[in-house]
Amino acid sequence: MSIESAPAPLRHRPALTAKPSRRLRAVGAQQALTAHHYREAYGWTVDDTGSLQMGGGMIGVLVQAIFAGATAEFLQRQESCGPVLDLGMGVDGWLFLADPNGLVLSQQEMPPGATVLGCPYKIPLPTPENRVVRWISPPRSRARWLPTLATVLAAVVASSPS
């Protein structure tokens, strides 16, 4: 699987390993759900291959590996961490799902180490057929809200050395 419509630099960067804390470690195979489950449980637009369509109030923020663990931990401390994916496949970093909440920024306005993936990107999800992708912080059916883009970007800035 790959990120569809992704710019070349995202596909071919050597992967760096972000080191999550104990409470952020991916839980592995038990988190691989079917495309049908993602559609039913979370209301996400997921095709039969298990790819999540960005848009409709959902974007991904790709945070480089060197900032990803600290960003996730910052969001956890603020009780604002939504679903976070490790896409594997040589992608440098973790993908934080977020609600754009009307915020539109150019890449030049983004903090270093962060890239927004909106529509028309398709992001692979962990499924029984795709075990390369894994959840760092899985979605929760009882808390289906996503953090705002502004919240995730503030966490990236707070987690980056000045």
Image (tube, helix red, strand yellow):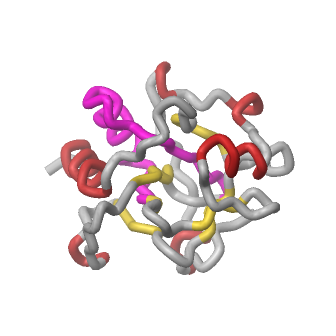
Q: Is residue 38 above or below residue 136?
A: below
Residue at horizontal 54 percent and vertical 67 percent from the top = 54
Residue 19: image location, x then y, percent: 47, 34
Q: Is residue 124 above or below residue 105?
A: above
- 154 on left or right of 124: left
155 in the magenta segment: no
The outermost residue toward the left is: 162
Residue at horizontal 58 percent and vertical 60 percent from the top = 91
Residue 67: image location, x then y, percent: 35, 47
Tell me where the magenta segment starts and ends, as one range.
Answer: 61-89
Residue 8: image location, x then y, percent: 57, 79
Residue 112: image location, x then y, percent: 27, 63
Residue at horizontal 25 percent and vertical 77 percent from the top = 108
Q: Is residue 157 above or below residue 45?
A: above
82 in the magenta segment: yes
Residue at horizontal 55 percent and vertical 78 percent from the top = 120
Query: What is the quadrant of residue 100 in the picture?
Result: bottom left
Of residues 157 and 33, the one nearer the viewer is 33
Residue 89 appears in view: yes
Q: Is residue 101 above or below residue 136?
A: below
